[in-house]
Image (tube, rainbow, N blue to C red):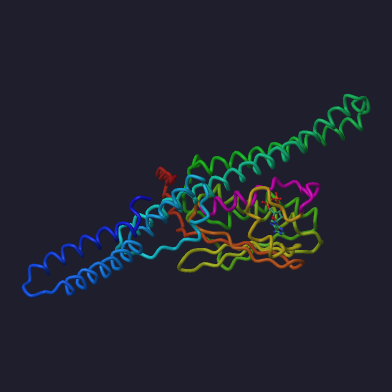
Amino acid sequence: MFFSSKRVALLLGFSIALVTTAFLSLVEGVSTQALLVGSLLAFSSSYILIQVALDFLVFREIKKIYTMINKLRRKDLSFVEEEKLESSVNPLRRINREILDYAAHKQKEINDLKKMEEFRREFVANVSHELKTPIFAAQGFVYTLLDGAAEQPKLRKKFLKKAARSLDGLDLLVQDLLTLSQMETGGIKMHYEHFNIQETVQEVFDQLESEAEKKGITLKLENTQPATFVYADRQRIYQVMINLVGNAIKYTKQDGKIVTILFTESDTGVDIVVQDEGRGIPTGDIKRIFERFYRVEKSRARNKGGTGLGLAIVKHIVEAHKSEVQVKSKVGEGSTFSFMLPRGEKPIQPALEISQPESEEVE
Ligand code: ADP
């Protein structure tokens, strides 16, 4: 570089020495020796001072900026993590800081995009696999029928039933996928209303009664109050309860076990708890069970009829109610899922034919 710190310091030092000597020569009685010493002193001190100042304040920072720009050109953003710049009054250092902030921002964007791409690839692979399973099964049953099983009434019914069950599974999966995608794109409106959640739980029990009975599981609603009012989207909360109680039944093996629902009312809201005495979830898996298609049992053959999307939907709905699902579980002992909802009020019964107020709609 033409403007190196040494050259600039040399030039300025020489000029300062020249000016100092010129001024000294105007003073009467100053000897040539003193003039020489004065100019030497002026030159060396100004040379050293200027070089140090330029090196530390300007050229070092400029060099850093160049290195950063070169790294940015090569898309090497590793320096973003390494570099830590303290705030400074030096404008060059501030420029340096700006570049670093910009690079850090870009690095975050790149990381997010990479993660999204990975997530998208995984999601497409999972959806394809989950769709393929029931389609292949139904296809197999239909071909078996075509190959002759249809001639025998007993076999015909058996294979038709199996094909229908596979297609039901497919239908469930597509419905869950649609619900999830609508929730993520904000396409679903929440319809908030005041309602008695104990009635909702009773409807869930009615729906899942036969499934529980088949496995010898008792469904129990532990209520200290005759009614528990919450302010939420009734349909969505019904879906949450179906998924949670459904899982509690699905992942409980032995006869004689109990699935309990309980409510705790407090000033902050109503805590809704679904407790089972099933197989439990290993600690390492707990934080992942809300991911789409994540299953504790890794083999795909383990699918107990679930779509692998149930808890992802639960999480979305509960979060839409500004709440969070808590999980406590111990392998072999059971699991507890809980979440809070805002307290509701008992709706005032209209005296006679008074038109019902419409429920509030919130995006
Ligand atoms: P699935 O359709 O597989 O049930 P979910 O999203 O509902 O999908 O649940 C994800 C996984 O979390 C399940 O595959 C299961 O391994 C685990 N899980 C969920 N609820 C329970 C529970 N009550 N007891 C034990 N494991 C559970």
Task: Please tell me in which quarter of the rendered image ligand 1 is found.
Answer: bottom right
Q: Residue furthest left?
A: 28
Image spot of residue 231 (x, y percent): 47, 55
| Magenta region | 298-319
Which quarter of the image is occupied by the C terminus? top left
Residue 314 within the magenta-colored segment of the rendering: yes
Q: Quadrant of residue 178?
A: top right
Residue at point 53%, 44% (across, down): 184
Residue at point 46%, 61% (across, down): 83
Image spot of residue 154 (x, y percent): 92, 32
Image spot of residue 215 (x, y percent): 80, 56
Q: Indicate left or right for 4 with 19 as reference.
A: right
Residue at point 67%, 64% (across, down): 275
Q: Indicate left or right for 43 with 343 as reference.
A: left
In the image, 49 versus 125, the foreground residue is: 49
Q: Quadrant of residue 216?
A: bottom right
Is 95 located above or below residue 125 in the figure? below
Image spot of residue 192 (x, y percent): 46, 49
Q: Indicate left or right for 149 with 262 as reference.
A: right
Report the label total.
0
In the image, 322 versus 88, the foreground residue is: 88
Residue 295 within the magenta-colored segment of the rendering: no
In the image, 52 versus 145, the foreground residue is: 52
